[in-house]
Image: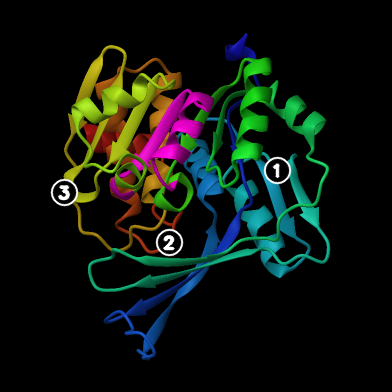
Amino acid sequence: MAERRRWDLLAFGDPCMDLSLDVDQWPEAGGKVMARAAGHSAGGTTANAACALSRLGGRAAVFGRIGADLFGEQLRRSLRDDGVDVEHLQVVAGVASGLALSLLPPGGDRGLVVAPMAAAPPPFPVQRLHDALLQSRVLYAMPRDLAELTRISQLARRTGTRVALDLEPSVVGDARALAQQLPLADLVFFNEAGFRAGTGEAPSADGLRRLLDQGPSCVVVTLGAQGAMAADRDGVVRQAAFDVPVRDTTGAGDAFNAAFVLARLEGQSLAASLRFACAVSSFVIAEVGARAGLPSRAAVDARLG
């Protein structure tokens, strides 16, 4: 049944506009530094993943909101330009579209300030999400509210849709929060900081295996310049990062996650999926902006040799 579904990935969350500034150093508390405008581009964690998957040949849609403003129209157009379905992208009057400000110091390891859209008023769009899930193989989300996550996970289970979560430090919180989130997911992604926040320890093979015991069938951790590691019921694998110049890390994790999901949906092994995802993210970090470096499938296959 899943093979006949309309979309490989349904990205749950609101897109946002990314504004980027180049800085020579971080400002001190109460201080000021000069910056150079590095441009603005469409972004948003789950929307970036949808665009990455689409450019790689997958089928993606976004379930989220934009404001009825200039940024909102740019966000919608950018998704459509990348082949992402916007049927379930709702335009909300009187609310500003989400914004994210990236500060890019030398080396490209950016700092990020996010101003999301105002929370949606009740009621939750249960029927609309249910209908979208029926057409989706994987729901991809970065949960910020446990009650909402529980609701969307329950809906996904009813429709036979797998749940993939991106658990960064701002959403995983601590071990208690992690223990509540893990049973609601099939596939869980962390960056290194998110893994440490949720478990209180550095990523390790044993640590990943322990998380599998709490519900998900696969756990993946990105490690920046050290590559990535992943675990499923068959074992733990590691992959080194591809050696490329780093310009901006914005969106690299989003593209990595999307590539990994697509590879697994294609039936690739855990090791092959991890290598494919690392290759995809190596294109993104070489350009400024979350989507500027998103590669085609042909480009990734060429890099993989």
**Disc 1 + disc 3, Cβ < 8 Å:** no
Q: How is the image coloured?
A: rainbow
- At horizontal 74% and vertical 40% (from top left) the residue drawn is 88
Mark 1 or 2, nearer chain start: 1
The answer to which of 210 and 223 lies nearer the viewer is 210
Residue 179 point in image, percent of width and height: 44, 32
**Disc 1 + disc 2, Cβ < 8 Å:** no
* Disc 3 from disc 2: Cα separation: 19 Å
- At horizontal 31% and vertical 55% (from top left) the residue drawn is 285
Amino acid carrying mark 2 in the image:
Gly
Q: Quadrant of the C terminus?
A: top left
Instruction: Give the residue pinned by disc 3.
Output: 243
Amino acid carrying mark 3 in the image:
Asp
Residue 41 point in image, percent of width and height: 52, 64
Instruction: Give the residue pinned by disc 1.
Output: 86
The residue stretch that appears in magenta: 173-193
Q: Point out the residue furthest to the front here.
A: 176
Q: Quadrant of residue 296?
A: top left
* Disc 1 from disc 3: Cα separation: 35 Å
Residue 153 point in image, percent of width and height: 61, 27
Sort mark 3 into few (<14), some (14-19) or many (20+) by Cα contacts within 10 Å.
Answer: few
Instruction: Give the residue pinned by disc 2.
Output: 289
Asked if residue 174 is among those painted magenta in the image, a careful observer would answer yes
The answer to which of 289 and 109 lies nearer the viewer is 109
Identify whether 85 is placed above or below 127.
below
* Disc 1 from disc 2: Cα separation: 21 Å
Mark 3 or 2, nearer chain start: 3
